[in-house]
Image: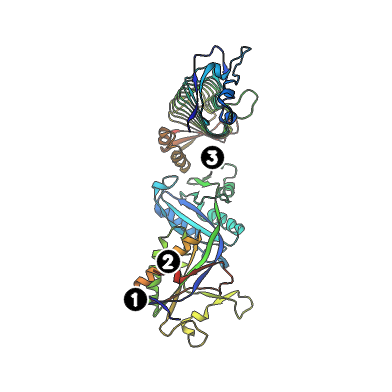
Amino acid sequence: MKPLVFILKQEPDQRLDLSPLVPHLLTRKSAKEIAAIELQTTREKITAGDIFKIRAGSAEEVRFEGGSVRLDNVGQGLKSGEIIVEGDCGKAPGREMSGGNLVVAGDSGPYAGSAMSGGRLEIGGDAGDFLGAPLEGEMEGITGGLLIVRGNAGNRAGDRLRRGTIVIEGSAGDYPGSRMIAGTLIVLKDCGLLPGYLMRRGTIVLANAPELSPTFADCGVHELAFAKVFAGLLRDESRAAARLLGRPLIRFAGDMAALGKGEIFFPA
Amino acid sequence: MRPMKRNGVRIDDSFAEAFPMRGTAILITAPTRRWALQAATTMTGFATSVIGCGAEAGIDGERPGKITPDGRPGVRVLMFAMSSDTLQTQLVNRAGQCVLTSPGSACFADLDGADRLPVGDQLRYFGDGWQVSKKFGDRHFWRVPVMDGEFLCEATTGLTKKAVGGGNLLIMGATPETTMHAAELAVEAMNEIEGVILPFPGGIVRSGSKVGSKYKAMMASTNDAYCPTLRGAVKTSLDEDIGCVLEIVIDGLTEESVAEAMRVGLAAIVKLGPDRGAVRVGAGNYGGKLGPFHFHLKDLLP
C-alpha cells in the first residue's frame, strides 16, 4: 500500500495543531475530507489542504514531506501504524501515543513523547526540553514504549519517567531523569547538572562520568545480567547503547533525598 | 499374528499410552557452562515421576551464549505436572531453592504462549523491598539483590496445556549388559530431540510399575509381568530369551515431539540389533482406556 503523504507547501505563518492527522482518525476519510480538516491554533482558519499538498494512500502509513518547528502535536495519541516526518516538528510529537511508530527525521520542540505509554518514537535530530515529560499538573511522564533521540536532548529529559526506555544518543541538558518514578534512561554523551534529581526508582545509564549530587551513594562496580539482557534487546535500535550496557558499570544508588531506590550507572 | 521384526529385533504390536500434562520451560544461564548445568541439574533433581516428586523435570538441552538473552551459557529445563497449580508450585519452589541459590544464575522464560506461570513475580519477594522491576517491550524482569550481585528472573514463563507425559519404550534383552547398551543408545538419540525430557535417572527406569497392589496403601507396585525373575511364577509377558527389561519414559511439550523421540529411540535400538542390544521392544499401556494419546510402535518403526 502507498502511504498517505502530506507535502508541506510553505512555512505556516501560525503554529498548527497536527493532532487530527493520525492514522486512526484518518482511516475511511476521503482525500477531500482530509483536506478539510482544520489545523489552526489562532482565529485564522487553516485546513490541511491549505498547507499541505495531499497524496492519497493508506492512512496506516502517514508521511509528512517537509517539516517546520510550527508543526505541533504530530502523532498525538498514535495507536498503531506509522507516521514519518521528513523534517523538523514543533512541540510534543508523539504525546500520549500508545502504539505504532513515529519517526521525526529532524529536530523536535519540547515535550517530545510526553506521557507516551507505548510504541516507538524516534527523533533523528535534537529534542527540546522536557523530553517525555508530563505537562503541568500531570503526575507521570512516559509510562511505556521506546523513545530514541539520535541527537541531543534539552533539560529535564525523562522527567517523571514511570516505565519504558529512553535512549539519548547525544548529550542531555540539566537534570536528566528528574523525579523519575521508574523506567530506564540512557545518555550516550555528556549530561548537565544533577542527573536523577529527586528520582525515586528507575535506572539511568550515562556513558560519561557525571557530577552527581551528594545524595547518590556509591555501590561499587558490577557486571549485571540485566544490563547484558537490555544490551541484547537494544542492539537493533542503538548499537552504542548496547555497547555501553555491556561494559562494567559503577552503580550509584539514589536519590537519597527522595525514596533512594533508583540508580545511576556509568562506566568505571 | 506374525511378530514384526526389524534387523532381528522383535517389535510388539503394542502402543505407549500417554496422558495430557501441563508443561513449561525455562532457560537458566550462568557465568559458565558448568554453573548453568549445575543449577539445571539441581532444579531437575528428584523429579522422576509426578507420583512421588510433584513434577517431572529434566534438561532439554544446552544453549550457547550466542543465543541466550544475556549472552552467557544456558540450559533449557522442561517441567511437567498433572495440573497447572502443581506445576506453578513446583516451578517456584524449585526455581527458588535451586536456581536463585546457584551462583551467578539468571532465569528466563523459554516457552511462548498466552497462558503464563509466574516465576520472578513470586521470587521477587526474596528481595525484601530491594527488588527492581525492569520492563522492555513486552518482557518483564525482576532483579533481586543477592550476595554475589543480582539474581535476574523473568516475571513469567509460558504454560502449555498440550504437553504429553508417559510416552515409553520397554527394552527387552538377553542380559542386563546388552539391554543397558540398547537403552543407553536410545537415550542418547532421544536426548537430541527438542522439547522432550526423559525424567528417570539417566533417562532409564528399571522399576516399571503396574496399577494397584495387594497392599491397600500402595497405588502402584512392581510390574510382575515384566520381572525376569518371576517369569515362571506369574502370568508373564516375557519370552524365554529375555533376562532383563529397561524402560524409557518420555515427557514432551507436544504430542509430535514425544512421537519423534520414540521414533529415534526405536531406530537406535533396531540399528544395534539383537546380539549386542535388545531382542524385543514393547510399550506400556493400560488397555487404551486411560490415556488419550496412543503411540503405536508399528507407526514409529524405521
Residue at image mark 2: B263
Mark 2 touches mark 3? (CB < 8 Å): no
- Give the spatial CA distance, label 1 vs label 2: 20 Å
Mark 2: amino acid: Arg
Q: Chain of mark 1?
A: B
Mark 3: amino acid: Lys
In terms of depth relative to the viewer, which is nearer, B299 or B192? B299
Q: Is residue B39 visible?
A: no
- Give the spatial CA distance, label 2 vs label 3: 42 Å
Rendering coords of residue A164 (x, y %) = 54, 35
Relative to B12, residue A236 above or below: above
Q: Chain of mark 2?
A: B
| Residue at position x 44%, y 64% in the image | B261
Q: Secondary structure at mark 3?
A: strand
In terms of depth relative to the viewer, which is nearer, A74 or A61? A61
Q: Quadrant of the C terminus of chain B?
A: bottom left
Rendering coords of residue B52 (x, y %) = 57, 67
In terms of depth relative to the viewer, which is nearer, A51 or A212? A51
Quarter-of-image position of residue B129? top right
Q: Chain of mark 3?
A: B
Locate residue B121 relative to residue B238 in the image: left or right: right
Q: Give the residue at the far right of this rendering.
A: A137
Q: Secondary structure at mark 2?
A: helix
Q: Is residue A75 visible?
A: yes
Rendering coords of residue B27 (x, y %) = 47, 52
Residue at image mark 1: B276
Please tell me whether mark 1 or mark 3 is closer to you in this view: 1
In terms of depth relative to the viewer, which is nearer, B60 or A80? A80
In the picture, the disc for residue B131 is none
